[in-house]
Amino acid sequence: MDDTSPYGYRVEPRYRRLLDKAPEAVMVLDPNLVVRYASRAIGDILGLDPRSVAGNPFSAHLHPEDEAWARNACAASGLGAGGSSRELRVRHADSSWHWFEAIMADLTGDPDVRGVAVYLRDVTGERALIPFRSIDVTTPPPPLPTKSNR
């Protein structure tokens, strides 16, 4: 694999090796949500070929209810100094929706990046446990019914 995406985004080989082993997907987007770079993990977690993602709008993979937030976050004024994060839905290659924690950082002023860095961590499994998070495990359960307390 060479070090230039089809969209012309170059990553040094040593950094590509680090990114290729990361469990989270790393992308660089332009202000219009066009993917300038996608790490190999995009294939592992979404079933998408990183080379086919680069150069195309990532908005095509976002849930319609989450697209406006992503567009606003990628706009020049949308990200504060510390970036922005949110859980959002992204379509997997099998057409199912997966939940991701998306962290976006404005690195458009960095000459080595020149875009918005996006880090995606799959939280689909964690979200499935949300109803159980509210259970207080410190309180003992009520006593089981017996013949005397029925």
Image (tube, rainbow, N blue to C red):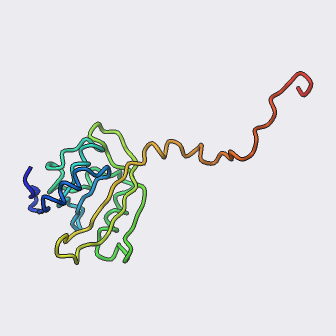
Quadrant housing residue 103: bottom left
Seen at 81% across and 33% down, the residue is 143
Q: Residue 12 occupies which quadrant of the picture?
A: bottom left
Residue at left 16%, top 55%? 54
Q: Nearer the viewer, residue 45 or 23?
A: 23
Q: Position of residue 124 (x, y in %)?
A: 42, 44
- Which residue is the extreme one toward the front? 14
Asked if residue 105 lies left or right of residue 110, the reply is: right
Depth check: give the residue in front, 63 or 51.
51
Residue 119, given in percent of the width and then of the height, sits at 32, 59
**Residue at 22% over, 69% down:** 115
Q: In the rendered image of this protein, does residue 101 appear above or below residue 30?
A: above
In the image, what residue occupies the spot 14% across and 50% down?
51
Expressed as whole percent of the image width and height from the top left, the position of residue 15 reads 19, 60
Q: Nearer the viewer, residue 17 or 130?
A: 17
Depth order, front residue of 38/18? 18
> How far across and down, in percent of the image, does residue 19 sit?
23, 55
Which quadrant of the view contains residue 111?
A: bottom left
Relative to 8, is 94 on the left or the right?
right
